[in-house]
Image (cartoon, rainbow, N blue to C red):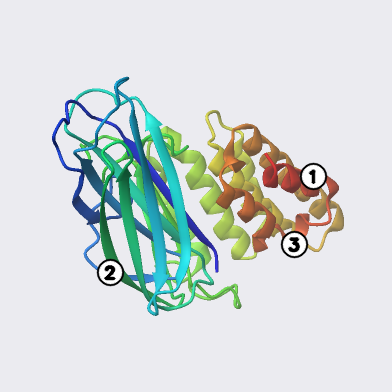
Amino acid sequence: MRLLATFAMLLLLTDRAGAKVELRDVQAAQGPLGVERKSAEYVAGDEVFYRFAIAGAQTDSNGRLRGELRLTLADANGKVLDKTENAIQQLPALGSESFAARASWSLGLGFAPGEYEVTVEFADLIAKESASFRRKFTVKAVEFALVRVRFHHDLEERVPARPGGTVGQNLAIKFNAIGFDRSNPRRVTSRSGLYRPAAEDLDAATPLVSADLLPVLGVDKGSLLVSAGEVLKGVAEVQKALATSGVSSECRFDGARVYARAAKATADAEVAEGLVREAVAELIIAEKGGYFRSTERATLLATHADFAALRSQEEFKTLVARAAHP
């Protein structure tokens, strides 16, 4: 079972003398800016995320807030599975009688199905008061689903965005696909049911997308062609896509995946060796762009099935070690 509890807050406080600390406007949500989540049912691999406001917290004579945010996860029998305490000692910013906060638990793919309850408590260490809320939720076994859906204004995921926007605006969507069957590489994976027609669909879409998304489209097309058995054509598409300017680290990571799969698929040892080198080179560029600072991405680098052809390569081993211990 892999579990990660996190919290974050944006302080917006002002005069709170005489106020009693409380937690308001609690919402289960699809991330900090996503839509409210109405269902309390999750699948293993998903994320439990709550956003809320803390009101009435006191500050000391220096205007500094001192408190703790305490997060607890328990199973249906009341057994505590995870408990974290995060100190909050900082000067409030701007002006408001409350501040926004959030708490989340990352459910690993091996997270056991069942009923769970979380408790979120904020303790005001100055006023000697606390406030909390509890929520119950259900976890199902892994099934095919798109989870952890997020919108961003940029492909590097630096600027979160709300769902929606204006005509002509670029929005990037990020999600995890889980529960799909890898046992048969020729199973239907696109709406057209065939890899080659799906690649042709991307050709048709090319005039409709902005220039900054063309590398992504090219890597996706290359991936489909490699899956269709057209290895050299797929590799050529990826090489063309990654040779353009402004390619994101995520796109390079995906391109490296295609190179690695192509290396495994080809019967030509010399071609395979060259593709392995290209894959590692793209991953190193992604590393320099900070792509593996995320623990989840570093883990993906070390465990992703697409990188099977790279595992014996010393430079790849060194890269995995660096990503694991940044």
Name the residue located 56 percent from the left edge and 38 percent from the top edge. 249
Q: Residue furthest top?
A: 62
**What amino acid does circle 3 point to?**
Lys
Disc 1 from disc 2: Cα separation: 42 Å
**What amino acid does circle 2 point to?**
Ala
Image quarter (top left, top right, bottom left or bottom right) of the C terminus: top right
> Horizontal and vertical percent for residue 322?
73, 42
Q: Which mark is residue 318?
A: 1
> Horizontal and vertical percent for residue 243?
61, 34
**Does 135 sit above or below residue 315?**
below
Name the residue located 34 percent from the left edge and 24 percent from the top edge. 91
Q: Which mark is residue 155?
A: none
Q: Considering only order in the chain, which callout, 2 or 3, is on the residue closer to the N terminus?
A: 2
> Pointer 2: what residue?
40
Q: Considering only order in the chain, which callout, 1 or 3, is on the residue closer to the N terminus?
A: 3
Choose top left, top right, bottom left or bottom right for residue 113.
bottom left
Please tell me whether mark 3 or mark 1 is closer to you in this view. 1
Disc 3 from disc 1: Cα separation: 21 Å
The reply to whether residue 141 is visible in this rendering is yes
